[in-house]
Image (spheres, helix red, strand yellow):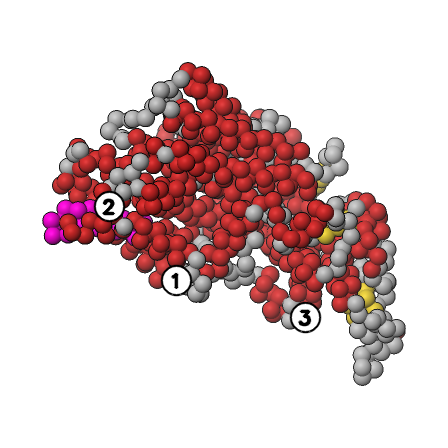
Amino acid sequence: MKFGKEFEAQMVQEWQEAYVDYSNLKSILKDILRFKQLNNVPSPMAATIKGKLKRNASLYRAFSGLTSRFRPESTLNNNEDEVILVSAVQGRDGEGDYQTMFLRSNEEGAEHELVFFRRLDDEFNKVIKFYKKNVAEVIVEADELSKQMNALIALRIKVDNPVIGENDVVNLVPNGFSSNSSSIDHPTNGGNQAWSMMNVIQEEKKKEDNDGINGGEGNKKEGFKAAPLEVLDHVKINVEVGTPLSTLKAVIKSSKSNLSFSRKELRTAEEKITRAIVEFYRKLRLLKSYCFLNQLAFSKIMKKYDKITSRNASKAYLQMVDKSYFGSSDEVTALMERVEDTYAKHFANGNRRKGMKKLRPQAKRERHRITFLYGLFSGCSIALIVAIIVNLHARALLNSVERDQYMVNIFPLYSLFGYVALHMLMYAGNTYFWKRYRINFPFIFGFKQGTELGYRQLLLLTSGLSLLTLAAVISHLDIEIDPRTQTFRTLTELIPLFLLILVVSIAFCPFNNIYRSSRFFLIRCAFRCVCAPLYKVTLPDFFLADQLTSQVQAFRSLEFYLCYYVWGNFRERSNKCEDSEVYRVFYIVVAIVPYWLRFIQCLRRLLEEKDAAHGVNGLKYLSTIAAVALRTIYQFQKQKTTAWLVLAAATSGMATIFNTYWDIVIDWGLLRRKSSNPWLRDKLVLAHKVVYFLAMALNCVLRLVWMQQVLGIQTVLFLHGTALTAVVASLEIIRRGIWNFFRAFKSVPLPFCYDHNGDNSM
């Protein structure tokens, strides 16, 4: 593989614009090569092309101010072997910019080489600034993790309540180092400071070895002080409330200001810090890879330059790269080593190999069996779709009197599985793009390491569910056609119910098959969503609740199952559900339940975090509840009144505007006029900005689709009203899938929260 393609494949997509533009530099070198080749071919065409290349280079040089880079010819007398001079020029902001002076500017065709070095300098300065900025950020994060580790070790000691003797020393960070992030002047201070950033409490049993060989002054830990257990007086532990009973106790006892020093809190704190350290180490690895790849790119491009121009400029330039902060700094390497030592000591019982397996998890081995099975299931599903279409035409069901009866009674039963399969398909697409653009979704959602489902596993489940559903549909139709099976009419009508029981049984199956850990993780999150007021709201909880708001029609299909098979005459394929007042009430209730769960979650977070944004978010869901309720009431009216139409349209319009604004501005962080990317957010995962604008436009369009029910658009061409409802519900699921990709963000939950005094005490 050529280096250019390999370079692009290993890029961190989120940092794509910060990498050296290797392809652009390579294209400039191609211009230089063409100029030299044409210089040896005296022909009218060559002269024309050569003149064009000269004019382009002159224009670029004039535009970029390259005339200041010309070296007087007299300076070459004592430097005949020199090609370039590289120096750092101090800028107004105190930052040094590297500039390359080309010493062969009097030669023919030098304009192209001047363009090359000017562009090369721009790329190198861009890379250095980005690298310095990110190193400074990780040093601040390391400082925060140091304080978190200090509190964790103190909590461990407090929970275990050990007896510390005179020979037992608990070591903290070296004296003279302030752990406040404000003490960090600049990341260029060297690797020693970065090493100190990740120093944590180290528990040493003895100052001397038992055999006495390394005893004496040489074995003493100089510059260390005993661990201040009073640090626990200045922190508050951020752990989720474990049970509804503990929540009620917390409400009765007002707020929880002090730690209870329980082992449960200790385990929760250890889990959170473990995930934070793993994610921090992952960021360090990406930063180190960024440094290595760009250094390699500069080396490759300079060697190409030497080869094309027959010069020897790469040596001087690469020496400058090595001596610059970009090539000589070791903060990231020192931090990585410190993290490895810390993790092995405090989370792997000193087993470094075990710790490294956790810090550097191996990529999951892709099984060909999974790929084969989801390909097989997908192919069979497509074949069944074709068979169903042929079956419908054979029976002329679309034009028969049985059409309405089938669409009203049978179609809603099977559409439930279609909604679920579509949502799983969208989530599979999300995981594929999250992985491609290096969004660490297992960490974001808190999946246990190695148990998360990749897009192949999700496609396998999706295609399997689709195959089961379509097989049930074709069986239903075939049994009706065959006159020999007319006596099994009751059994035929029970096929959708059997399918539902099968799917639910697989979901709740206690045996360790069909991804049990992921199934139970989903069930736990669903249970916590239902019991939202009694549990602390975590990211997986409110993310799942948001998904449920796009499955309103699926909940209504479940309600229809109950009505059809309990109160309806399923043997005769008929029901009078919509004539029942109870059914109508529950038809509204099941639709607003997902929004109500999100509203309760927002209230819980508002009370805990004291952030007004959660209150505003709760109002958003209240507006949606009002819109759904009024729209459904209007839908059930036999004689549509103007007053109810105005109310339904007004509330739906307000909810649509509110939700659309919140999606784009708050959840996606877009439409920021003063952003570094105008009207987008500062950090973009995707390199093509047009994708964000298209996503915003598509979100607005899909948000407006649900207005069709309010405006009375119940038929589109040949679509039955029930089918149109299914189409609208499917579009909402697609919108949610797009929302998921842009909503995913990196959040590192830490267990300890320091107050002001706590910070000063460290």
Q: Residue furthest bottom?
A: 211
Q: CA distance from mark 3 to mark 1?
A: 33 Å
* Cβ atoms under marks 2 and 1 closer than 8 Å: no
What is the secondary structure assignment of the residue under circle 2?
Answer: helix
Q: Residue furthest top?
A: 642
Q: Residue at x 61, y 47 (%)?
A: 534
The residue that mark 2 highlights is 571
Q: Residue at x 73, y 54 (%)?
A: 148
In the drawing, does residue 414 fall left or right of residue 149?
A: left
Quarter assignment of residue 194: bottom right
Residue 407 lies in magenta, yes or no? no
Which tag is nearer the camera, tag 2 or tag 1? Answer: 2
Say whether disc 2 or disc 1 marks the residue closer to the N-terminus: 1
Which tag is nearer the camera, tag 2 or tag 3? Answer: 2
Q: CA distance from mark 2 to mark 3?
A: 68 Å
In the drawing, does residue 365 fall left or right of residue 76?
A: left
Which residue type carries mark 3?
Gly
Q: Position of residue 598 (x, y in %)?
A: 55, 39
Q: Is residue 358 something that shows in the picture?
A: yes
Taking 149 as reference, is 603 above or below it?
above
Residue 367, label in figure = 1
Q: Position of residue 174 (x, y in %)?
A: 82, 60
The residue that mark 3 highlights is 350
Crowding near the residue tagged with mark 1, few <14, some 14–19, many ≥20 C-alpha atoms within 10 Å: few
Quarter assignment of residue 42: top left
Which residue type carries mark 1?
Arg
Say whether disc 3 or disc 1 marks the residue closer to the N-terminus: 3
Most common secondary structure along the magenta stretch? helix
Q: Position of residue 435 (x, y in %)?
A: 48, 50
